[in-house]
Image: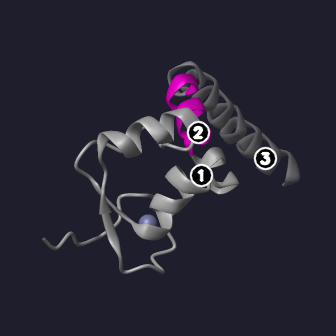
């Protein structure tokens, strides 16, 4: 059996050429360690490097990466309006300061 990449992990350094399939063991260890990014699914392919970071070592990088993903998907909807508003305000400020500068 030959499992092959690419690795699904977004922050993967791609230094490993040994591949692992995401099993229920990986999911449950990752959830226990809080190192499992929420886009990783059963049957996905990850490299041994990422496997170790998630399952064996619960590396700080993966801990952070998994949490960034969770925060982003929760906050996304609320912040869209604020973002758009501040962009519009910036444009108006620019136009006004150009006119004043003449
Ligand atoms: Zn990887």
Alpha carbon separation for disc pair 2 and 3: 56 Å
- Secondary structure character of the magenta stretch overall: helix
Secondary element at image label 2: helix
The N terminus, quarter of image: bottom left
Instruction: Please tell me whether residue 95 is drawn above or below residue 53 in the rendered image.
Output: above
Q: In the rendered image, which residue does mark 1 sit on? A: 62
Q: In the rendered image, which residue does mark 3 sit on? A: 99
Mark 2 against mark 3, which lies toward the viewer?
A: 2
Alpha carbon separation for disc pair 3 and 1: 49 Å
Instruction: Please tell me whether residue 49 is drawn above or below residue 65 in the rendered image.
Output: below
Q: Is residue 74 magenta?
A: yes
Which of the two labelled residues, at mark 2 and mark 3, occupies the earlier sequence position?
2
Mark 2 against mark 1, which lies toward the viewer?
A: 2
Left or right relative to 59: residue 43: left
Residue depicted at 43% across the width and 79% down the height:
16
- Give neighbour class at mark 2: few <14, some 14-19, many 20+ (Cα, 10 Å): some
Could you say which disc has been placed on residue 33 in the image? Answer: 2
Which of the two labelled residues, at mark 2 and mark 1, occupies the earlier sequence position?
2
The magenta-colored residue range is 66-75
Residues at marks 2 and 1 touching, judged by CB atoms closer than 8 Å:
yes
């Amino acid at each position: 059996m030959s499992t092959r990449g690419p690795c699904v992990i977004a922050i993967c350094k791609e230094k490993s050429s040994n591949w692992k399939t995401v099993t229920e063991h990986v999911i449950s260890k990752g959830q226990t360690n809080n190192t499992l990014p929420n886009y990783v699914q059963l049957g996905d392919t990850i490299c041994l490097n990422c496997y170790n970071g998630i399952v064996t070592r619960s590396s700080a990088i993966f801990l952070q990466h998994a949490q960034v993903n969770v925060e982003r998907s929760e906050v996304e909807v609320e912040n869209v309006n604020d973002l758009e508003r501040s962009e519009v305000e910036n444009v108006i400020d620019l136009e006004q300061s150009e006119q004043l500068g003449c």
